[in-house]
Image (spheres, helix red, strand yellow):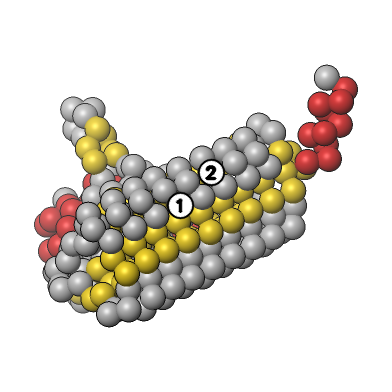
Amino acid sequence: MLTFSQLSELTGAILEPANIQGSLEKCATLAFASPSDVSFCIDEAAYGAARTTKAAAVFVPENFAGWVGEAKVLARVKNPYEAIIKCAEILNKKEFTSSEIHPTAQISPNVLIPPSVKIGENCVLHSGVNLYPNVEIGSGTILHSGVVVGSRGFGFYSGENGEQIAVPHFGGVVIGSNCEIGPNSVVAAGFLEPTRLGNFCKLDSFVQIGHNCIVGSNAIFCSQSGLAGSVIVEDDVTLAGGAQVAGHLTLGKGCIIAAKAGVTKSIKPGAKVAGFPAIPIEEWRRRNVLA
């Protein structure tokens, strides 16, 4: 844990109000933070989530003038992203434990299983699968050759001299039961919370699931489709081959994204979209006829 004074000393934050008592247990994103957590707000795009957060303390930019939910403390810093990383390296760093592999799981040769991994009953891991720490795989899930689960998410922040510094990802990955992930697909670790796949998800080959994504159950992602970071996918969603989704969007329940579509806005439940930028599929067909 960190006290509020230690938080200030570690990050150079100016606390409002100052001299507050108490301690913080872990780092969490605004939406998931509890009353004992510290979170961060980078820019105006996150202000909506900031207004409803339950975090005890929130790192904000020095010129922040908004309102932050139930937070006891605003912690003003030059770079909120860098500040939360410094705290997470203390509060969210997990001790390695022995992996838990159910005796019915089928593990082929040349599978990398590091510490702190859980593999459920009747799972099948084919040759060449690579798991990273803090990965949990539900029962009956199949991982084909070349699958990578739990690698660091693709995130960087600018240092004092403008250099790009890799963001560590502490959250790991949780994959549900009865999923199947095709050859050479990747599920990246979450930053502070796990990247998640629900039950009965079916991923083809060369599928990318970015860090912090939350995918519901019964998702079908065809080959070469992908999600950028922090996408929420509700149940029963289909991505056809080559479809790509930009970060921080929501795909509503049962929606269908056509082949090679580029999704730049959230999609309503049940919608069918195509093209780039993705639009309702009937409109896309009419445009093609008139072109």
Which amino acid lies under the numbered mark 1 shown in the image of this protein?
Gly
Which amino acid lies under the numbered mark 2 shown in the image of this protein?
Ser
How many neighbours does mark 2 have within 10 angstroms: few (below 14), some (14-19), or many (20 or more)?
Answer: many
How many neighbours does mark 1 have within 10 angstroms: few (below 14), some (14-19), or many (20 or more)?
Answer: many
Q: Residue at x 72, y 43 (%)?
A: 273
- Residue 114 pos. (x, y %): 18, 62
Q: Residue at x 53, y 59 (%)?
A: 202
- Please indicate whether residue 202 sits to the left or right of residue 229 in the image: right
The relative height of residue 170 versus residue 262 in the rendered view (above or below) is below
The reply to whether the C-beta atoms of the residues labelled 2 and 1 are less than 8 Å apart is: yes
- Please indicate whether residue 119 sits to the left or right of residue 49 in the image: left
Residue under numbered circle 1 = 182
Q: Is residue 81 visible?
A: yes
Q: Give the farthest residue toward the top.
A: 291
Name the quadrant containing residue 9.
Answer: bottom left
Q: Which mark is residue 223?
A: 2
- Residue 110 pos. (x, y %): 22, 54
Q: Which mark is residue 100?
A: none
Q: Tag 2's secondary structure?
A: loop
Q: Residue at x 44, y 73 (%)?
A: 140
- Residue 31 pos. (x, y %): 45, 64
Q: CA distance from mark 2 to mark 1?
A: 8 Å
The relative height of residue 178 versus residue 15 in the rendered view (above or below) is below
Q: Tag 1's secondary structure?
A: loop
- Please indicate whether residue 199 sits to the left or right of residue 263 in the image: left
- Of 44 and 97, nearer the camera is 97
- Please indicate whether residue 156 sits to the left or right of residue 262 in the image: left
- Of 190 and 35, nearer the camera is 190
- Residue 92 pos. (x, y %): 22, 65
